[in-house]
Amino acid sequence: MAELKGIYPILATPFQSSGELDENSFERLIEFLVVSGVHGLTLFGLAGEYYKLSDDERRALRGIFLARTQGRLARIVSVTEHSVEVACKRAREAAEAGADALMVMPPFFLSPDPGAVGDHIREIARAVQISLLVQYSPNQTGLRLPARFFAELAEEFPHVHYVKVDSTPAGAMISSLIKESRGRIKPFIGYAGLQMVDAFARGAIGCMPGCSLPESYLEVYAALVRGDRKQAAALHSRLLPLINYMMQSLEFIIQCEKTILCWRGIIDSDYCRRPGMRLTEDDLRSLRELLDSATPQFAEKRTRAQ
């Protein structure tokens, strides 16, 4: 099984201004991220608008993703279906297509009880033998689970040993996951890496941010790996005003990420399928100012491109 650690951006889904998939931009985005040096990529995360895609579109994107990244880095494909039967089918399809690991979004629609949620994940774990990473996003899903829930899964299934923590506060959950599982669980910090430095101090081994600024997250990660927490905190502090601004809501950060990707010349359109959130002129001005402060090394290049 693949060992997962490092920076694993969540891929955005580029659309044309008409709302149709933009496969060319998607391929450019993948190439940009691979060349940037990230350790892996994650397809169909919440920030990827998976909930606005048809089954055919998801199959097409998965095919492009796995083909363009073969042998180049670790690939995670999310399983987001709410029924056990369909989720297991999608999990097997992704594993057979070459995914290195799966990220499982626990079912949350109509508030299933924890027992049903646990059974859902167990059935997926029985269906595949590759690593599973369980996504814990209570702010977005309304589904709150204790650390012991995940620890029991890790005890029962050795390949269910990663959890992506999108909860707030994240630190306490990360500490509890490691303690309750006696180190079996290897946490990733999500939520745009807002608490990345603290998360790693508590034992996190990876971060799943957005995909517009991989270089900045890689700088923070490199400092953390070499044990220079002071430098990591300084680099992260430069990013914080921008991250904090973008994380006002899920749809807001999705739109901000795509706008930055457009400014960087990586995708052709920042269109998000509706319902979504469009940025006002004031939003764009604030985003630009915060982006330039967070990434001065790219500011001049962006200005020339625009």
Image (cartoon, rainbow, N blue to C red):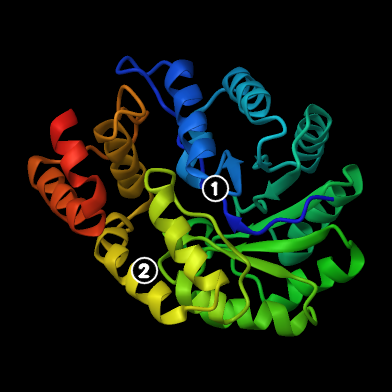
Q: Earlier in the sequence, mark 1 or mark 2?
A: 1
Query: Where is residue 105 drawn, in percent x and y?
Result: 64, 50
Residue at 76% over, 53% down: 132
- Local secondary structure at mark 1: loop
**Left/right of residue 225 with respect to residue 139 in the rendered view:** right
233 up-or-down from 164: above or below: below
The residue beneath circle 2 is 236
The residue beneath circle 1 is 38
Quarter location, residue 69: top right
**Left/right of residue 211 with respect to residue 128 in the rendered view:** left
Separation (CA) of disc 1 from disc 2 = 17 Å
Tell me the kind of residue under disc 1.
Val
Residue at 53% over, 75% down: 199
Query: Where is residue 117 drawn, in percent x and y?
Result: 74, 58
Residue at 89% over, 43% down: 127
270 up-or-down from 112: above or below: above
- Residue 21 visible to the viewer: no
Query: Where is residue 99 drawn, in percent x and y?
Result: 74, 37
- Residue 247 visible to the viewer: yes
